[in-house]
Image: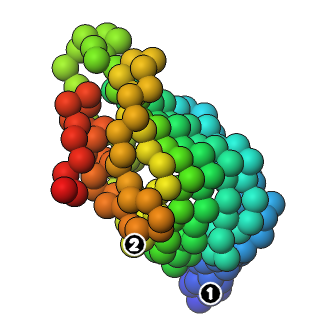
Amino acid sequence: MRRALHGSWISLLALLLLVLALLGWAGWTESGLRTLSRLASGRLGPITLTITGVHGTLASGFHADRVVVLQRRAEVDVRGVDGHIGMLPLLWQSIHVHDLHIASAQVVVPSVPPDHKPWKPHILIGLLTIQVEQLHCEQAARGRDEQDADVERCARHEQPCDPAALALCVQRGPQCTDQRG
């Protein structure tokens, strides 16, 4: 009985050390970041995610040349992404981004959904939360179908962009207007 008890807490401790080692490898090495981006690229529930040109580390700062999110109601193409992610919140399924810089972003919202079915918005998986403290976006455009109707969404010259405004634009579709004033 005593041997089984010791074996169970030793196994639990070994499992905890393995999780911490994997988190350290993924967060503080460039090969870990590249592996994570390769694993994340592809079909994730209702979205298709493509991440290219990744270098750096999650904890010390990363860069992605291009991030493309394809979803039934919107296509988001983001280029020149730089940022820093908090490592500890990843343990409780939260992505906490300290600062994020985007060179350009384009949101294309089809005027009519391809399948004409009613839609309940959901992108994130289960209990996953994403929080961004600071977001800087140099240029953003909103297109409708294949048209590139440029609409200024983010401030120029390093002024912060409201992350909720870009999310609101995706929800509202082609009728979106800038709410910052």
Q: Is residue 91 visible?
A: no
Determine whether 76 is above or below 59 in the image. Answer: above
Residue at horizontal 48 percent and vertical 49 percent from the top: 139
Q: Nearer the viewer, residue 31 or 137?
A: 137
Per the image, the residue denoted by label 2 is 133
**Label disc, if present, on residue 160 of the rendered structure:** none
Q: Residues within 10 Å of mark 2 (few under 14, many from 20)?
A: few
Q: Position of residue 86 (x, y in %)?
A: 52, 75
Callout 2, which amino acid? Answer: Glu
- Give residue 163's position: percent from left, percent from top: 34, 58
Task: Please state if 29 lies on the left or on the right of 180 as rendered.
Answer: right
Can you tell which quarter of the image residue 176 is in? top left
The residue drawn where x is 35% and y is 12% is 114
Circle 1 sits on which residue? 6
Residue 110 falls in image quadrant: top left
Quadrant of the drawing holding the N terminus: bottom right
Amino acid of disc 1: His
Secondary structure category for the residue under label 2: strand
Residue 158 in the figure: left or right of residue 61: left
Image quadrant containing the C terminus: bottom left
Mark closer to the chain start, 2 or 1: 1
Instruction: State the image coordinates of residue 20 (x, y, percent, origin top left).
Output: 64, 76
Q: Give percent across and percent down for residue 172.
A: 21, 35
Residue 175 appearing in the image = yes
Q: How is the image coloured?
A: rainbow
Frontmost residue, 16 versus 140:
140
Q: Answer above or below: position of 66 versus 74.
A: below
The residue lying at 56 percent from left, 53 percent from top is: 103
Gap between marks 2 and 1, in whole Å? 44 Å
Horizontally, is 62 left or right of 46 in the view? right
Q: Residue furthest front?
A: 157
Label 1 environment density (alpha carbons within 10 Å; few <14, some 14–19, many ≥20): few
